[in-house]
Image: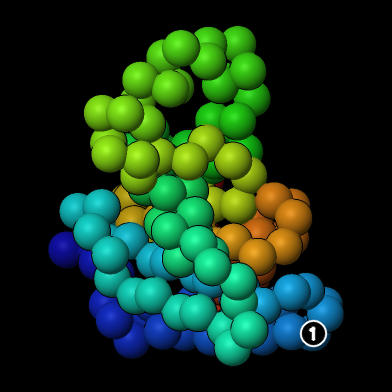
């Protein structure tokens, strides 16, 4: 059975943080969820502002729960705000449909979890998530 080990989650986060630092992005908060949608790993850069972890977890939870990148959810939310607001309420706020999170998959397409980041723009957050996943030899959607 394919699963996201703590070792692999650490490699994903290390590569994501390295990419953010190389690009000169602001300090990040990064959260990795496992295949049950539970927090596997949390990383907060020195100097990351308040709420970065909560936002990163909300993005990752949204991507995981809906099975698509949070960028896709942001687009969908624009057409159906009442539904997406209801999801936020139903999940006690752990649903942030903003760009910056993707679903982590194995090469065979098995969902292993999700990763979300917060600290930069949504595009920057998403970029480092994808960089971390790819550095670990995994895929995303």
Q: Secondary structure at mark 1?
A: helix
Which of the 4 quarters of the picture holds residue 112? bottom left
| Image coords of residue 95 (percent x, y) | 40, 39
| Image coords of residue 44 (percent x, y) | 50, 79
Q: Nearer the viewer, residue 92 or 109?
A: 92
Question: Which quarter shows the N terminus?
Answer: bottom left
Asked whether residue 90 appears in the rendered view, the answer is: yes
Residue extending furthest front?
Answer: 50
Residue at point 59% right, 41% down? 98
Q: How many marks?
A: 1
Residue at point 48% right, 41% down? 96
| Image coords of residue 50 (percent x, y) | 54, 68
Left or right of residue 29: residue 78: right
Q: Nearer the viewer, residue 59 or 128?
A: 59
Residue extending furthest right?
Answer: 24
The answer to whether 4 is drawn above or below residue 112 in the figure is: below
The answer to whether 122 is drawn above or below residue 12 in the figure is: above
Look at the image and name its color scheme.
Answer: rainbow
| Image coords of residue 35 (percent x, y) | 24, 56
Asked whether residue 136 appears in the rendered view, the answer is: no
């Amino acid at each position: 059975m394919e699963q996201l080990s703590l070792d692999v989650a650490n490699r994903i986060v290390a590569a994501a943080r390295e990419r953010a630092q190389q690009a000169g992005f602001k300090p990040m908060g990064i959260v990795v969820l496992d295949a049950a949608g539970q927090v596997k790993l949390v990383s907060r850069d020195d100097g990351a502002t308040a709420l970065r972890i909560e936002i990163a977890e909300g993005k990752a939870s949204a991507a995981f729960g809906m099975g698509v990148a949070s960028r896709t959810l942001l687009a969908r939310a624009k057409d159906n705000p009442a539904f997406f607001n209801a999801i936020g309420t139903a999940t006690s706020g752990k649903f942030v449909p903003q760009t910056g999170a993707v679903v982590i998959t194995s090469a065979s397409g098995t969902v292993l979890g999700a990763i979300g980041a917060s600290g930069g723009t949504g595009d920057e957050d998403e970029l480092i998530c994808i960089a971390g996943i790819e550095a670990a030899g995994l895929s995303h959607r």
